[in-house]
Image: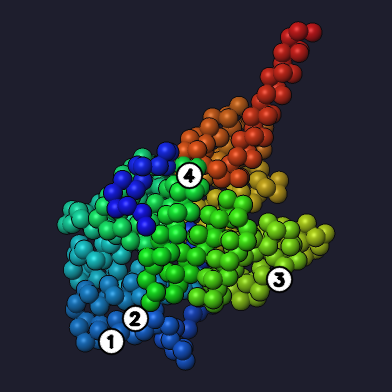
């Protein structure tokens, strides 16, 4: 197990926990109340208890806070974003009853992170800290917000405070992500292993999420078999876990089993279609020479991702899709520039760098890709883009020198 203090600062160069990492499914039809299920989940039971509490004490903020937390858990379990909208309504009712009540502020910060309102989440978390400065969960929210805004120094400081207060699964998960962002792959795997070991066994979705994150780190390290074992364990712990299915699909693709990956993604898409799965399927169909099927999935991606972008207030996935498939390059640059104005994490920097490059602005792309590389991340996408940008600049410089010499 990791030591309680100096967990982050001990690594040479040194999150976003599931609330940020997960992409939700956009439902266009009305969602039936989950408590009507014949086999209610733990979140369903929490929703029922909170509803009963509100009926007994309608003027108490506590019942609405509990209902909001239960809806947010249900959103994680089902990947259905509509439950977050219900959570937001409950938080608003709680704050209307008791302005600035601490639990509601914590829940609001958490929900704002889910909606990718990172600056607002940071402000709300700071507002909560005016009442309490020793809450490890709020320090976690500050960590997440700073990571997504690109303030990695501040994120490390906040995560260290979180670990010092209570070194639990959520703290170790943030340590893992920060280490990964700073290129410490072995450290990221070790921290995520600690997160898994300390996960609450009574929260199967949380345990499955830890397996997925550990699988992702192992996959990034090229340890395909170990990674796939964790994706399989996640699916055993929480069947049909969306992130686990996507991880399994990536593992099969990396292993060269394209048809196996297709079957996994088709299984996922048959249940609850998502933009990410549509893009992955489209790419696989393209590699398999099934252009008509690929076209259908790419069209589905654009439809679903536009809805996601409206909810998340982020066009990053659409931007990257357009750039990777040489579509709407001018629009991609416009949107990437706009994203960079409010969010300067390494992945936003990479998207803008690649958009500049694809639009023939290679010199400007160099500045942005340098920003994307500032943490030492080993992210394959960033490294590939950097290599292409630097290579193009080098060739251009050589051509200029030859021209002057002639």
Label 1: how many residues lie within 10 Å, few (<14), some (14-19) or many (20+)? Answer: some
Q: Is residue 307 above or below residue 184?
A: below
CA distance for labels 4 and 1: 48 Å
SS label for mark 3 = helix
CA distance for labels 2 and 3: 35 Å
- What residue did someone put label 1 on? 52
SS label for mark 1 = helix
Image quadrant assignment for residue 306: bottom right
Disc ID at residue 46: 2
Residue 387 appears in view: yes
Question: Does residue 63 appear to the left or right of 146 in the view shown?
Answer: left
SS label for mark 2 = helix
- Of callouts 2 and 1, the N-terminal one: 2
- Of callouts 3 and 1, the N-terminal one: 1
- Label 4 close to label 1 by CB (< 8 Å): no
CA distance for labels 4 and 3: 33 Å
The percent coordinates of residue 157 (x first, y second) are: 31, 44
Disc 2 or disc 3, which is closer to the eye? 3
Label 4: how many residues lie within 10 Å, few (<14), some (14-19) or many (20+)? Answer: many
Q: Which residue is drawn at 20% across and 71% down?
A: 97
- Label 2 close to label 1 by CB (< 8 Å): no
Disc 4 or disc 1, which is closer to the eye? 4
CA distance for labels 2 and 1: 10 Å
SS label for mark 4 = loop
- What residue did someone put label 4 on? 184
The percent coordinates of residue 98 (x first, y second) are: 18, 68
Disc ID at residue 263: 3
Disc 4 or disc 2, which is closer to the eye? 4
Question: Does residue 275 appear to the left or right of 131 in the view shown?
Answer: right
Q: In this view, does 147 lie above or below 253?
A: above
């Amino acid at each position: 197990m990791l030591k309680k203090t100096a967990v982050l600062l001990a690594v040479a160069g040194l999150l976003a926990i599931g609330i940020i990492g997960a992409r939700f499914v956009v439902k266009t039809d009305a969602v039936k109340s989950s408590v009507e299920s014949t086999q209610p989940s733990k979140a369903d039971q929490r929703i029922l208890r909170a509803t009963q509490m509100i009926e007994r004490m309608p003027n108490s903020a506590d019942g609405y806070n509990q209902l909001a937390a239960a809806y947010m858990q249900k959103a994680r379990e089902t990947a259905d974003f509509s439950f977050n909208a219900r959570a937001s309504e409950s938080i608003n009712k709680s704050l209307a009853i008791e302005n600035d009540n601490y639990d509601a502020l914590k829940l609001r910060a958490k929900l704002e992170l889910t909606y990718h309102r990172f600056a607002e989440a940071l402000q709300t978390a700071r507002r909560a800290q005016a009442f309490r400065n020793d809450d490890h969960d709020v320090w976690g929210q500050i960590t997440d917000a700073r990571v997504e805004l690109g303030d990695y120094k501040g994120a490390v400081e906040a995560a260290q405070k979180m670990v010092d207060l209570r070194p639990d699964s959520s703290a170790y998960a943030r340590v893992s992500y920060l280490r990964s962002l700073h290129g410490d792959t072995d450290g990221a795997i070790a921290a995520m292993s600690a997160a898994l070991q300390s996960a609450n066994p009574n929260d199967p979705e949380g345990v499955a999420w830890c397996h997925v994150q550990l699988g992702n780190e192992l996959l990034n390290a090229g340890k395909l078999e170990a990674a796939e074992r964790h994706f399989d364990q996640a699916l055993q712990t929480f069947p049909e876990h969306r992130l686990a299915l996507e991880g399994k699909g990536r593992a099969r693709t990396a292993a060269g089993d394209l048809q196996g990956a297709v079957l996994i993604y088709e299984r996922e898409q048959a249940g609850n279609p998502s933009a990410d799965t549509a893009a992955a399927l489209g790419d696989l169909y393209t590699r398999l020479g099934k252009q008509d099927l690929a076209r259908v999935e790419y069209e589905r991606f654009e439809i679903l991702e536009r809805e996601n972008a409206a909810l998340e207030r982020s066009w990053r996935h659409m931007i990257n899709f357009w750039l990777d498939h040489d579509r709407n390059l001018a629009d991609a640059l416009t949107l990437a520039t706009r994203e960079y104005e409010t969010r300067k994490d390494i992945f936003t920097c990479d998207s803008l760098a690649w958009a500049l490059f694809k639009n023939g602005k290679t010199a400007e792309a160099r500045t942005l890709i340098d920003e994307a590389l500032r943490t030492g991340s080993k992210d394959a996408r960033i490294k590939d883009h950097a290599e292409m940008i630097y290579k193009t600049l080098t060739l251009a410089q050589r051509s200029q020198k030859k021209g002057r010499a002639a």
